[in-house]
Image (cartoon, rainbow, N blue to C red):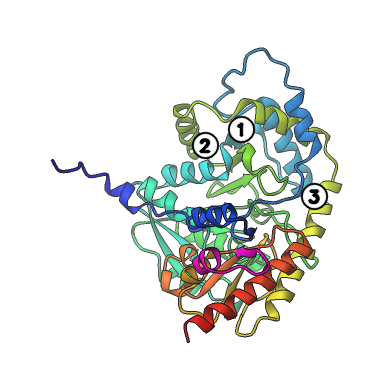
Amino acid sequence: MTLLTISHRAEKTPPSPIRKLAGLAQQAADRGTHVYRLNIGQPDLRSPKEFLEGVSSFAKEVVAYEGSQGSRDLLSTWVSCINRDYDIELTNEQMLITMGASEALIFAFMVVCDPGDEILMFDPTYANYIGFSAISGVRLVSLPCSLEDKFALPTREDIERYISPYTRAVLLCNPNNPTGAVCSDDELRMLVDLCRERDLFLIVDETYREFVYDGVKPRCIYEIAPKDPRIIVVDSLSKRFSLCGARIGCMLTWHPEVMRAAFHIAQARLSAPTIEQDAAAHMLQTIGDQYLRDALAEYQTRRDAAVSALSRIPGVTTHAPQGGFYLLAKLPVKDAEDFASFMLTDFSSGGKTTFVAPAAGFYMLREAGRSTIRIAFVLNRDDTDVAIAVLGEGLRAYQSRRV
């Protein structure tokens, strides 16, 4: 008897490059090796006490479905916070609460595109976009950016060369995961003008919006293009407040038909988590600005530690990202995934090893990232120093084995 085949969509959905080697890391830990996990954007900063207080104070006797658009308290509170910080005139009608930014992105893909339509994006990019495109039947068209140019956007002329009759949107992650690149106001205006003139949507993932360094000002795209109906913003509380497991994100748009269609999809999946929405509303109503100020200062310290430590490893090329909490580093190896596996299966120093994410999975043009890794600087400065020193030792051992 032959096995039934699975769908083409399922075949095209790639494994996560962030979690692909997680089994090897667990095996290393089971052997007693201490694994420094620089592979995933899981902050170790404490979640705000205000959120945990919100969870503890949930007093309803039934955990019922929340409304499909989201909790009224969370909608009103989150809208007020964004309006206060960016002088944007949002109302609840422009926001839809989602299960993390991931669901908001899937909604956006499915609403603006039919299967086979295209979205332009900038390579390298958040690896899960590739999975979202496979799930929704959308084709991502990648425009390459380079480490040598600090991952600056292509020129408008270069972008226009990729537009086809099937292009429906441009997708931007700002600040970028995995590169840490932050768009200038001029670059944002260029993309807005391009989308207006070429009749395209602009989807902007602002999950890391507040994490910008060296005096750079956080920007929301709606400051550049107020109430522009072509723009869809995706946002999340996950990274900003160290709440990855709460799965609270949102989609913002002034386009009534986009919101109506997204709401219908939201009704089909019923609702986002009730208790987490209640706790998030309590947090946003009671938390002060100091939490984010402290988080930003801590991540800049970690970034500087990571860049400094990498600069001491011969043959490694990187740069200091302006935002987010990731960087890409090019290694003097042919296959970064093979090296990352080696670190987990065949190497330890003083009972320690380092887990990094091979960067090829963040590239649509995978060969462009074959010798590159992504590092998430989510460990404290001392652990970051040790983790990257261990990485350097592992690199020397790896190279000596393959001479």
Coordinates of residue 395 in the picture (x, y in percent): 58, 77
Q: Does residue 116 appear anywhere in the picture?
A: no
- Residue 113: give x, y in percent of width and height: 39, 47
Residue 274: percent from left, percent from top = 62, 25
> SS of the residue at dot 3?
helix
**For the residues bearing labels 1 and 2, Cβ distance under 8 angstroms:** yes
Task: State whether residue 209 is above or below residue 319.
Answer: above
Query: Is residue 349 rendered magenta in the image?
Result: yes
Q: Inspect the image, locate mark 1, and give the three-letter code of the amino acid beneath it.
A: Glu
Residue kind at label 3, given as amino acid type = Leu
Q: Nearer the viewer, mark 2 or mark 3?
A: 3
Q: Which residue is mark 3?
A: 292
> With respect to residue 160, does 5 lie above or below?
above
Residue that extends furthest to the top in the rendered view of this protein? 61
* Above or below 377: residue 330: below
Instruction: Report which residue position mark 1 lands on.
Output: 93
Q: Quadrant of residue 4?
A: top left
Where residue 253 sits: x, y (%)?
Answer: 57, 42
Residue at left offset 59%, top offset 81%: 396
Image check: 217 left or right of 24?
right
Q: Amino acid at mark 2?
A: Met
Q: Which residues are magenta?
A: 341-354
**Sequence order check: which comes first, mark 1 or mark 2?**
1
Identify the residue under disc 2.
259
Quick one: label 3, few (<14), some, or many (20+) residues within 10 Å? some
Dividing the picture into quadrants, the one containing residue 320 is bottom right
Query: Foreground: 288 or 361?
Result: 361
